[in-house]
Amino acid sequence: VISFTGSTRTGQWLLAAAAPHVKRLALELGGNAPFLVFADADLEAAAEALVANKFRCAGQTCVCANRVYVAQAVAAPFTALVAERVRQLKMGNGLEPGVQLGPLIDRAAFDKVRQHCDDALARGARLATGQLPGPPATVWGNFFPPVILAGVTADMLVVREETFGPVIPLVEFATEAEALAAANGTPYGLAAYVFTRDPALADRCAQSLEFGHVALNSGTGPTPEAPFGGMKMSGFGREGGVEGLLEYCEVQTVARGGSEAG
């Protein structure tokens, strides 16, 4: 088996290259994780989980929340709680005490995050907190300051693509059906997060969301003891748990006749 974690494009290339050999693959590919906050959610807990989830590795993990959907009724207080925490983040050298946010991996990553922010602002979004880095590039290097974008809509790059950077785009929703349709409105299906105090609503979300990993009232991602992997364009196969070990096994059936008895 070829086990690969990376971009969807590279995964597609591996599929084509492995086909002549009939080689099995286990692929964890791109993501576009939704983070749903319903009106009855514990907003403090949701804000804490979002900031911890989104800004680890400066937003550069495949399970980082990429699209944040928040109920209209609590959009204002939730935004304020998240903004309060974002303003406290310290950006700098990760070897220095207290630093929580490091640089992006290269200039191409920096430019992509900036493009997503510029596109959103040009289409009507607004900065809820934070500032976009300005020239010259040598001042900022690959450090991109954390920002929150409010008034985000489905046509913006920060929703349609995986940003892979320290940007929280907030999209408001009115109904459960609207939130779930928006969350599933992507070709990717790696991780999703739901915050609600209603167990029935949480269960409906888990059953409806087309993602391999669904966290309820938690911002945690994969753990070694649990299977983890994607659906749709996020790949197939699992890592972790017994299921992850089975990816490396071939099942053989041995049928024994009666002549061997005794």
Image (tube, helix red, strand yellow):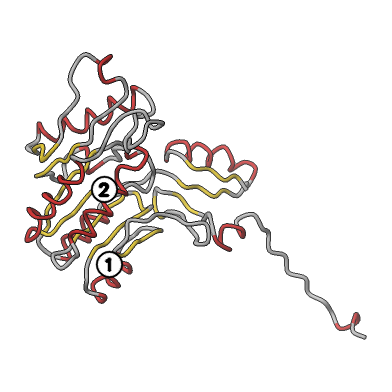
User: Pointer 2 and pointer 1: residues touching (CB < 8 Å)?
Assistant: no
Q: Is residue 50 left or right of residue 252?
A: left
Q: Is residue 231 left or right of residue 82?
A: right
Per the image, the residue denoted by label 1 is 205
Q: Quadrant of residue 21?
A: top right
Could you tell me the amino acid type at mark 2? Val
Instruction: Kindly identify which numbered label has been placed on residue 51.
Output: 2
Q: Secondary structure at mark 1?
A: helix
> Callout 1 environment at 10 Å: few (<14), some (14 to 19), or many (20+)?
many
Q: CA distance from mark 2 to mark 1?
A: 22 Å
Q: Secondary structure at mark 2?
A: helix
Q: Which residue is located at x 25 percent, y 39 percent?
A: 89
Front-most of 33 and 100? 100
Q: Residue 22: percent from the left, percent from the top?
A: 63, 47
Q: Earlier in the sequence, mark 2 or mark 1?
A: 2
Front-most of 111 and 49? 49
